[in-house]
Amino acid sequence: MLFMLFMVKWFLSRSVSVAYRLREMNKKNNYKKQVNPMKWTAEAETAIKKVPFFVRKKVRSKVEAFAGQAGKDRVAIEDVQAAKAHYMKNMDEEVKGYRLDACFGQGGCPHKANDSEGLARRIESLLENANLREFLKQQVNGPLKFHHDFKVTLSDCPNACSQPQIKDIGIIGAAVPAVTDAECSMCGACETACKDCAVSLDACAGKPVIDWERCLSCGQCAKVCPTGAIAVDRYGYRVLLGGKLGRHPRLADELPGIYDEDSVVAIVQWCIDEYKRGSTKGKRFAELVAEDEGLIKRLLEDIGDGRFVNRPYSVRPLCNGHS
């Protein structure tokens, strides 16, 4: 059980830079695996099946890489145990002071609302320049562990596979829709595509109506509209702060509005600075957000309202007695 939990934590500790490099190299790596796949003994297979399914494939690849470095073409139970011992012993060395995660896979997110690769590179540069590992070494009494990392994650769509709701900073791609002057065919494709019941057809006006209280800016309605009656008005990002798991878990608080890339970078820098000012003994940024009710207000005042796009609010108009 300890091995399972460790390998999950170790896999999730990989930075987004690794994720995006893997995305670019995916086809090449998959080809190599198909040509010369590494074999596993039955005992090693039994051990890897105890790892949770949602990270099993990646944990398997890490164990294979560890065995491959030793010149082996077959993974035995001894290799699994050796990989476990190696990473348990060297955990402090693996901790970078931050963790930058993203949803990724071959071809990227199939539901992508906004591309985050360029943003990810800028954020990683900020995190690297912040010297968070050295900061933590000064604050933490003892060896560093993965839970000490400052955690940032990006998700290209509201499905949020990278779990931004439970990270110090969560960023979700957004495509803000808008009703245009183009003629609507009243086909209902937008209603069908919207998983959040945020789009309806107004028979009186002959136009779609967007409920901004429900809309998550996924952009799916615009993608399926055959006439352009709904189109993407602008692209940006939703930003969440202060999520964490552990003994006292909390969901992140979402900032108001949809932010452009420069604003997201400014927010991340502000949060890093606030974290280094307020964190002692390894205290998470999420804990600072939970303890300081004025933190988010100060952030919004410092960043300034003019740097982000507000989602307009509208109510569904009355038509035939229905609201």
Image (cartoon, rainbow, N blue to C red):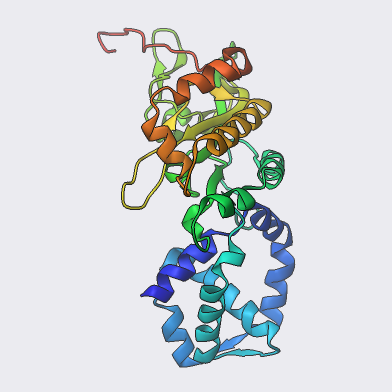
Q: Quadrant of the N terminus?
A: bottom left
Residue 322 or residue 289, whichever sits in front: 289
Judge whether residue 309 can be spotted in this image: no
In the displayed structure image, the side of residue 160 where residue 272 appears, left or right: right
- Image quadrant in which you'd find residue 212: top left
- Is 145 above or below relative to 181? below
Asked if residue 90 can be seen in this view, the reply is yes
Residue 235 x/y as whole percent: 62, 27
Q: Is residue 167 above or below residue 55?
A: above
The part of the image, by quadrant, that contains residue 319 is top left
Residue 76 lies, in percent from the top left, at: 54, 91
Residues 150 and 213: in front is 150
| Residue lying at 53% horizontally and 71% vertically, measured from the top left | 59
Where is residue 310? Give x, y as percent: 53, 16
Q: Is residue 213 above or below residue 116?
A: above
Residue in the picture at 73% in, 62% down: 25
Q: Nearer the viewer, residue 151 or 139?
A: 139
Q: Is residue 119 left or right of residue 177?
A: right
- State which quarter of the image contains the C terminus: top left
Residue 213 placement (x, y as % from top left): 38, 21
Residue at 66%, 90% (x, y): give it.
73
Q: Residue at x 49, y 57 (%)?
A: 141
20 shown above or below 41: above
Displayed quadrant of residue 60: bottom right
